[in-house]
Amino acid sequence: MIRYRKLGYVELMVTDLERSAAFYRDIVGLEPAGEGPDGGRRFRCSEDPYAVVLHKARQPGFRRGGWMLEDERQFASLHAALKSAGVAFESLGDAECKSRGLGRATRTVEPNLGATLEFYLLPAATPPKPFVPTLAKIQRLGHVVWATPQYEEANAFFRDVLNFAQSDSLGEGITFYRAFPNPYHHGIGIGRAARNHFHHLNFMVTEIDDVGRGLARLKAKDVPVVYGPGRHPASTSVFLYFLDPDGMTLEYSFGMEEFPEIGARAPRRLEPTPANFDSWGSYRDPRMSTTGEIAAYKVTGAA
Ligand SMILES: [Fe+2]
């Protein structure tokens, strides 16, 4: 039983690094946190050293994501689970860990989405540093969602191999999971689509005013708002989705159901009606969640 702390970082591919770095700082409200080893731009929005890294690429999309494990012992559980599922994985070398500010990490590729997933701990001597908001009072990186034609298989991988806990699904079109025993309703979502793609990245904010002010800021800067403000009945979150300069979908959300580790309610299947996606009935722009590839990566290192 693998135990997680949280979704720790998401690395995105953008076509114009300067343009996107300015957007994530001045519109989204992330704090620049220096450069990674390959010129990636790091940003903070929590007590961690970084939560988002932007990389220059020809196509926008998802490069990789990192889940913080609960402790050192979880690596053995993770490796055993991947091994018994026949899924290749590799340990990051010391040099890569050091340059990326990680203490220890294992990397694998989700066999259906093709998404690169990393599982890590920070170095033991990493003091938490408060995030000082400048725009939205972001609390944390909330969740990442992908979509795939291999919907059942991807769901089975996260649920049965990685021990993610299912919270809810909307029909047979999208399912939400928490990185057990993280309490928040979802840290990932898996949607059904005709091709594998990145769907959206979420930031959880502190108050409803962050959503209202975000809406005003986005409109003032002509940033496309593609869904919301509205409320997702499944998670109870108030949401606002908008597009980054490459057209990738980002989300602010306020509030979310929290689950106890023991005695959590059973997952529900909600009918995929418009009201079950948004009880406020806002307009959903067809550009939402259409842009963003999933970077290919092949595991070659040794476990
Ligand atoms: Fe979301």
Image (cartoon, rainbow, N blue to C red):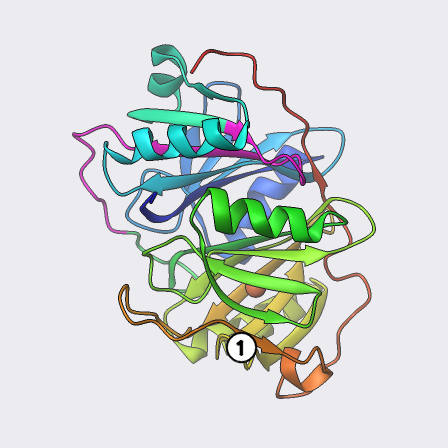
Q: Position of residue 124 (x, y in %)?
A: 18, 30
| Visible residue check, residue 297 | yes
Q: Dot 1 corresponds to which residue?
A: 234
Query: Is 215 on the left-hand or right-hand side of 112?
Result: left
Quarter of the figure with the C terminus: top left
Depicted 158 relative to depicted 225: above or below: above
Quarter of the figure with the N terminus: top left
Q: Within the image, what quadrant is residue 36 found in?
A: top left
Q: Residue furthest front?
A: 84
Q: Position of residue 13 (x, y in %)?
A: 64, 35
Residue nearest the viewer, comparing 75 with 128: 75
Q: Within the image, what quadrant is residue 284 found in?
A: bottom right
Please report the bounds of the magenta region as a residue range. Answer: 108-130
Q: Is mark 1 within 8 Å of ligand 1?
A: no
Q: Is residue 110 magenta?
A: yes
Magenta segment, prevailing SS (helix, strand or loop): loop
Q: Is residue 62 magenta?
A: no
Q: Residues within 10 Å of mark 1 (few under 14, many from 20)?
A: many
Residue nearest the viewer, comparing 282 with 92: 92
Q: Secondary structure at mark 1?
A: loop
The number of numbered badges drawn on the structure is 1
| Visible residue check, residue 101 | no
- Mark 1 belongs to which amino acid? Ala
Residue under the point 67% across and 80% down: 271
Residue under the point 65% across and 41% down: 19
Residue under the point 34% across and 43% down: 2
Q: Quadrant of ligand 1?
A: bottom right
Q: Position of residue 141 (x, y in %)?
A: 43, 53
Q: Position of residue 56 (x, y in %)?
A: 65, 29
